[in-house]
Image (tube, helix red, strand yellow):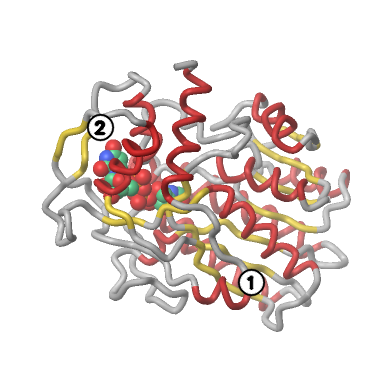
Amino acid sequence: MILVTGGLGFIGSHTVVSLQEKGHEVLIVDDLSNATTDVLSGIKQASGIRPAFEKLDLQDAVGVKKLFETYSISGIIHFAAFKAVGESVQKPIAYYQNNLGSLLNLLAEIEKSTTPIPFIFSSSCTVYGEADSLPINEDAAIKAAMSPYGNTKQIGEEIIVDSVKAIKDFRAICLRYFNPIGAHPSIAIGELPLGRPQNLVPFITQTAAGIFPKLTVFGNDYPTPDGTNIRDYIHVVDLAEAHVVALERILTGASNDRYEVFNLGTGKGSSVLEVITSFERVSGKKLAYTFGSKREGDVVAAYADTSKANAVLGWKTKRSLDEAVSSAWKWEQKIRDC
Ligand code: WQD
């Protein structure tokens, strides 16, 4: 059984569907802090299979121990974490307690298990900060974290590196995502930010749905071709498929190294204005937006060098920016009935 922690979340739920499509049996553990069990029905609608589910806060060490005693877990994909950059600045203690406490409880069970369980860690390009050169490869310098959220990802990676060294035969892969967007083609699952969305694409689609009067573009005087900053927007289904490839790589012991890191992106940078143009093209709607001041902590540009994932995992993105933005809009129209 593959344990997917945070499996009711945006990337988690899409990864569960991709795992099921490849024949894997899935157990979702989620604390429901940022998702509801309605997502289970969405997953069933998308894949035809309702995964096993346990509500559990992974900070509960006794609960985690009981989970591993109850289920025969053969692999773990660990998404469960608080992930709002801005919120992490306001609530650093909760972020460190949850994001690192959960990880440590899982690793403690792996350390006790007779055969170490392969582990996929959900990390982020945020660990690179403002990279010295673009595109960003896995050997790029890890800069001082620009938020407690980003720091929990950096520290999480270090904890895993040390655990791989200490635990015989333990194998882990760390996946550093760029900017996941979009929704499953069935539109049975998608991105469901609770409250005011922090991220660009849900803000665009919610503005177009009439929830907000307009989008504020955070700065248009960056040193970029159109003045707005640049990111690598990856379709969430491409990202989900990469997780299955990575898990199967360690399940089969294909890798020589017991710890590997991969950047997961399209390899192409898109500016905020290019994403807006993409939305207007795929929706046929004009988006109301205005230019505002820069957002604290935003880097000018970040997009992935995907050559390692392409060569070693044999994985590359298949879906375009337009397809991702279009799927996000279809999802928004469905959930808002607009
Ligand atoms: C994208 C671009 C904004 C909102 C964050 C985390 C990263 C990962 C993805 C978890 C930026 C601009 C945004 C708006 C705007 N999360 N923007 N108006 O900040 O690149 O990455 O989310 O793993 O770790 O750091 O994503 O979608 O917030 O911003 O102009 O209302 O859109 O300035 O250039 P970001 P984002």
> For the C terminus, which image quadrant?
top left
Which quadrant would residue 141 be assigned to in this image? bottom left
> Disc 2 residue type?
Leu
Give x and y (percent) for residue 324: 47, 44
> Which residue lies at the image location 43% right of the left edge and 41% below the top edge?
325
Q: Is residue 43 left or right of residue 293?
A: right
Q: Nearest the camera: 299 or 154?
A: 299
Residue 139 is marked as none
User: Which residue reaches farthest top?
Assistant: 337
Which quadrant would residue 187 be assigned to in this image? top right
Look at mark 1 in the image and give the residue it sits on: 313
Counting residues from the start of the chain, the first of labels 2 and 1 encountered is 2
Q: Is residue 149 visible?
A: no
Look at mark 2 in the image and give the residue it sits on: 215
Give x and y (percent) for residue 224: 18, 60
Q: Is residue 11 visible?
A: yes
> Disc 1 residue type?
Leu
User: Which residue reaches farthest bottom?
Assistant: 256
Q: Is mark 1 within 8 Å of ligand 1?
A: no
Q: Nearest the camera: 233 or 97?
A: 233
Q: Is residue 39 left or right of residue 266?
A: right
Q: Is residue 338 left or right of residue 17?
A: left
Q: Nearest the camera: 150 or 265?
A: 265
> Which residue lies at the image location 39% right of the left edge and 59% below the top edge?
126
Q: Is mark 2 within 8 Å of ligand 1?
A: yes
Give x and y (percent) for residue 164: 67, 73
Which quadrant would residue 41 be assigned to in this image? top right
